[in-house]
Amino acid sequence: MADLKAADNETLMHYLVRLIDRKYTHLTELPSDFPSLQQAARESIKQTLADLVALNNAVELVKPEFEAQTSPGDPFASMMRDFYTKAHEQLQATREDLNRIQDEYKGLLKYFGEAETTDFQDFMGNLVFLCTIFQKACDDNARKEQLILEAAKNAERKRRTVRHAESNDRSIAHSLTRSARQMERKKGAGGASGPQNPLAGPQGQDVLDSLIGSMRSGRAFGRRDSELAFNAELRSSSSQSLSRRIFIGTTKEREPATATTTAASASATDL
């Protein structure tokens, strides 16, 4: 489950954890249900059984020693008899616990479909590995969801910034257009001697378009820079407008001369 991966490096365990989190939420706490699993994986039933047999044999060696003491009131025999009795009881209880663990382990192997000869440490090691990759998949999925949420927030923040900038552009363009119209009305009311409106006509439209483009690119931010940029655009637009007027006037002057030359040529041809 940890080695089978998709194209985006998501493993089968990641998919299972996401499915469990969506349909069986209570199972996501699986690793916390086995707090002593790490310690259990370091133990061995076979070794524990061998140690218990060796300990029982050592305790049994004490029994002949105090039974051989025939002197009445001998403190050694009394102390060793008490020790043997308590040790024998503790060994018996430990043997019973070990037998119960063996029976439960056999039931666990049967539940998981494992062979009865499966070693206790190997089986517990597999459970530890399962819980480890399960917890890692949970952490990876949570981190991935957090990144998706942050990306969505950043995208929404960018969309809001763009909409705000577009709204500001429209507001500024509307304000400039309204100011231009007001100046046109004042010029009409004041006659030809009134102040000339720099934003009137096609030239003013070019200036407005250029100014809005500067604001979108960030070059128009800053009062002094905005004024310089506006004046430069106004001079550039004025130069371009003047060049167009000169070109048009020159063209109109050439048209009568061209017509006269054409007429003379036609008369000469008739003759």
Image: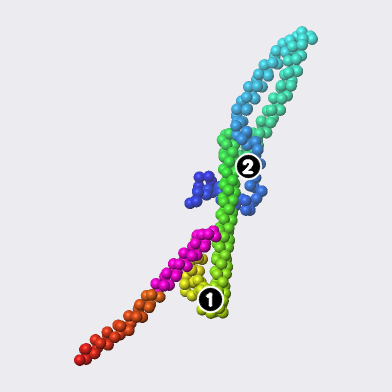
Image quadrant where residue 53 sits: top right
Residue ID at (59%, 51%): 146
Q: Residue furthest top?
A: 71
> Which region of the structure is painted magenta?
218-244
* Horizontal arrangement in the rendering, residue 199 relative to residue 61 (left or right): left
Give the label on residue 31, or none: 2
Q: Position of residue 176 (x, y in %)?
A: 55, 70
- Amino acid type, callout 1: Gly
Asked if the magenta segment contains residue 231, the reply would be yes
What percent of the width, then of the height, locates residue 96? 69, 30
Q: Is residue 113 visible?
A: no
SS at badge 2: helix
The residue shown at (77%, 8%) is 71
* Towards the viewer: 65 or 123: 123
Chief SS of the magenta region: helix
Packing grade of label 1 (10 A; few <14, some 14-19, many >=20) is few
- Spatial CA span between label 1 and label 2: 86 Å
The residue that mark 1 highlights is 194
**What residue lies at 30% left-to-right and 83% top-to-bottom?**
257
Picture coordinates of residue 232, whole percent (x, y): 46, 64
Q: Earlier in the sequence, mark 1 or mark 2?
A: 2
Which quadrant would the C terminus be assigned to in this image?
A: bottom left
Query: With 25 as the anchor, is 213 left or right in this view?
Result: left
Which residue is found at the position 60% from the left and 27% from the top? Answer: 47
Q: Single out the mark in the foreground, 1 or 2.
A: 1
Other residues around mark 2 within 10 Å, as few (<14) / some (14–19) / many (≥20): some
Q: Is residue 250 left or right of residue 144?
A: left
Amino acid type indicated by mark 2: Pro
Q: How many marks are shown on the rendered structure?
A: 2
